[in-house]
Amino acid sequence: MMKSIKVIGLLFLTGIHSINPLFSQNSISTQNLSGKNINTITTAVPFLLISPDSRSGAMGDVGVAIKPDANSVYWNPAKLAFIDDTEDMGFSMSYSPWLRALVNDINLAYLTGYKKLDRNSAIGVSLRYFSLGNITFTDNFGATIRDFKPNEFSFDFCYSRKLSQNIGAALSARYIYSNLTGGTNVGGADTKPGQSVATDLSMYYVTNEFKLADRKSDVAIGLNISNIGAKMAYTDNADRDFIPTNLRLGTAFNMEIDDYQEFTFAFDMNKLLVPTQPVYQQENGTVVYGPDNSPIIFSGRDPNPALPSGIFGSFSDAPGNVIIDENGNTVGVEDGSRFKEELNEINLSVGVEYIYSQLFAVRAGYFHEHPTKGNRRFLSMGAGVKYKVLELDLSYLLALTQQSPLANTLRFTLKFNFGEEVEEGS
C-alpha cells in the first residue's frame, strides 16, 4: 500500500479527521471505548481545521471572539473592521512543524494580511500551505514507482464591515486545492487533485465599555460558519467527500487591570457541520446489505447526502451507542445516547491572555475533544513580544493523552502592523 495512505492515517490519529479519499465513505467502524462506540467524523482536507497562528494556538485554540488582529481572517473575519483605527494595514506569517512526534517533514505555513478601507470596513487575504513531506509510491511487490511531495493549499479573500458601532459581519471566499497522489494510478484508478470552493459567514459583537470593580471591561461574542462549499473527489469513480464545514461560537471577556496591564478570558465551542458516520445493521457479526448492494443503516442517516442536508442534518444524525448482542447482531440503541453523542461532537476551548504595557504577553489554554470523537485533549502555553510595528509570538502544545501525535507541537508567528489614522467612511 502506498506510503501516502499512511501519512493520511497519521492525520486521522490527530483527531483532525481525514478520510482516505480513495475509498468509499461507507466504511464501517467496530471500535469500542469503555462500552461506547468510537465514531469520529471524517472529512477531506482536514488541514483547514489546524489552528495556524501562535496566539490562538497558545490559548487552547480559541479565537472567534478575542481582540482582532491579522489572523482574524482565519478565526472570524468580521473582527477585521474592529481593528484599531490607528493600524490601517497589517500582515502575519506563521509556521508550524506538524506531527513531529511521528514524522519530521510535515509542516503548515500561513500568510495573511488585512487593509482597513475606512473606519467601518476592511478586506483581508490569506494563503495556507500544508506540506506532507516526501512520499515514495510502491507497487504490490515493493518496487518503487515514483517519489512525490503531497501538498494542499487554500487561498482566501474576505470583506468585513461594521453594521453598527457594536456589530460587524463578514463574507469570505476560499479556493481549496489538495494534491495527495500526483496523478499516480492507485488500484487501477487514475487519481487527480481535489479542488473545491467555499465561503465563510461570520459575525462579531462587542459591548460598550463598562466598569467592573472600577476597571474598564468589555465582552465580545463571535460566530463563524466556515468552509461552506462543494464536496471534493480525488478520482472520477469515487464518492465525493465533504470538506470540513465548521461552526465556531465563542465569547471573550476583556479587562484593563490598570494603565499597563490587560487580561482576557475566552471560551469557544466548535462543531463540524458534516454527517456523522451511521451504524449499519449486522447479523452474526456481518454487515447486512440491501437490494441496491448498499449496507442497511441501523441507526443514523445516509453519510453522503446533499450539502444542505448534510449541514442541517449534522445536528441530529448521531447514531448513538448501538447495542450488539453476543451473536454479533444489532439489537437496539442505548436510551438517550443519540443526544449524548451529539453533545460529544462539540469541542471546547478555554484560554487566557495577559498583556503588559502592550509590549509583552503570556498565554495559556486548554482544548477538549471527547474520547469517542478523536480524543484531542491538550494544554497549551505561549508568549509574545512587541517592538514598534513587529510582534513575535510562540506557542507550545502539551498533550494530555498518551502517545499523542500532537505532543510538543510548536508554532511561530511574526506580525507587522502599519498605518495611520483611517478616514471615517460611510
Image (cartoon, rainbow, N blue to C red):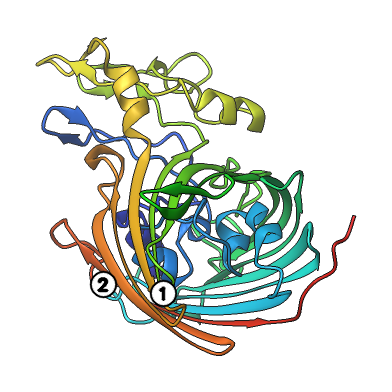
The amino acid pointed to by label 2 is Leu
Q: State the image coordinates of residue 267 (x, y, percent, origin top left).
A: 39, 47
Residue found at x 46% / y 20%: 316
Lateral position of residue 165 relative to residue 384, left or right: right
Query: In the depicted view, which residue is nearer to us: 312 or 32?
Result: 312
Mark 2 Cα-neighbour bin, 10 Å: few <14, some 14–19, many ≥20: some
Q: State the image coordinates of residue 377 (x, y, percent, origin top left).
A: 24, 52
Query: In the depicted view, which residue is nearer to us: 172 or 206?
Result: 206
Secondary structure under the numbered disc 2 in the rendered image = loop
Kindly tell me whether residue 235 is visible in this rendering. yes
Residue at which label 2 appears: 102
Residue at which label 1 appears: 260
Lateral position of residue 360 relative to residue 242, left or right: left
Quarter of the image for the N terminus: give it. bottom left
Residue found at x 69% / y 49%: 198
Q: CA distance from mark 1 to mark 2?
A: 42 Å
Lateral position of residue 356 relative to residue 398, left or right: right
Query: In the depicted view, which residue is nearer to us: 349 or 354?
Result: 354
Residue 177 in the image: above or below residue 199: below
Residue 38 in the image: above or below residue 357: above
Lateral position of residue 111 relative to residue 283, left or right: right
The amino acid pointed to by label 1 is Tyr
Mark 1 vs mark 2, foreground winner is 1
Q: Quadrant of residue 59?
A: bottom left
Quarter of the image for the C terminus: give it. bottom right
